[in-house]
Amino acid sequence: MKAVTITSFGGVEGLEVRDVPDAPKPTADGVRVRVRAAGLNRADILQRLGRYPAPPGYPQEIPGLEFAGEVESIGEDVRIWKIGDRVFGIIGGGGQAEFVTVPENHFARIPDNLSWSEAAAVPEVFMTAHDALFTQCGLTLGESVLIHAAGSGVGTAAIQLVKAAGAFAYGTSRTADKLERAKEFVLTASCVVGSEPMKIVEAVKEWTGGNGVNVILDLVGSAYLQANLESLATKGRLIFVGTTSGSKAELDYRIVMGKRLKIMGTSLRTRSAEEKATATRLFAEQVVPLLATGVVRPVIDKVFSMQDVRAAHERIESNETFGKVVLTI
């Protein structure tokens, strides 16, 4: 089979499409999927740079954390799926290849209204946002959520899920144009941060009458830590999803203790098979129906062919994306 392959760590010149051994024949509860499209994530950029290796058991040289395709063959214990079913899901690595073999409980059925490219833009960002907001932070009706990097893949998914749950979505971005586009997802209010993270604090005070927000979904990292702590309401929850501005910062314990805050981190890639299965089941039960009815939808920045993977990486590294970059396989 053909696959995107990291031939050397560093720049995009280290990416090639090569012939590699086929994905394993499925046994027991395994399913082999013919991949039609795969989402591209910042994790793939980091893996190409040599900074984010795949977990044990997944190919180190083939990136890809999510896929959309059709069931090609099944193991003898599979009962849920049949050959030809359209499915999408997450994988620890190797998703940017013609075939992947995964456990049957690590993916869900694609709604009929989604194309291959649209389906490939869903799993990683919608599962991440859903798990972070509802499973980890316990978001409830009427609460407020501040979403950093509102124009990112996870950001656009989170805004939609927050609104669908009857909560209030606020957004930030370092540039005004992305926030302008994000308004179509009915942000309650937004703030252009630029290079001054503490702008967030004043904006949140204005939006909430000084009360602060209940939940912050932080896709940016260390540069926003102090602003996050000051922007949270009493008993607020802060969850770390990304570290584009860095991964180390000084923490003021007094604010955390005084407000009785909860601080969490999340990553789907590093979870056990059982945890991934649970996240996938909740996604299938609670998010897929919203996709099928159009209440929420994938947001695609640009679609590239697998052969143009270098250009796709450059697109993400430009920081000009709004929504997801997708590869057709």
Image: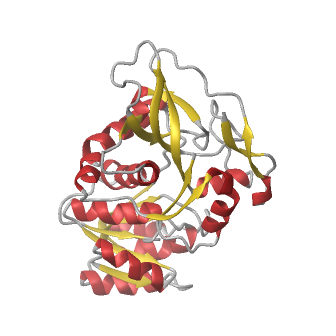
Left or right, 155 with respect to 6, comes to: left
**Residue 287 vertical placement versus 35 (above, below):** below
User: What x and y, as percent, mark residue 26?
Assistant: 53, 20
User: What x and y, as percent, mark residue 111?
Assistant: 31, 45
The C terminus: image quadrant:
top right
**Residue 271 vertical placement versus 105 (above, below):** below
Determine the image quadrant of residue 235.
bottom left
Q: Is residue 133 visible?
A: yes
Left or right, 146 with respect to 33, comes to: left
User: What x and y, as percent, mark residue 198?
Assistant: 48, 83
Left or right, 257 with respect to 19, comes to: left
Q: Is residue 261 visible?
A: no
37 or 129: nearer the viewer: 37
Name the residue: 43% across, 34% down.
106
Name the residue: 31% across, 41% down.
284
**Residue 205 vertical placement versus 322 (above, below):** below
Name the residue: 50% across, 38% down.
271
Name the residue: 39% across, 82% down.
180
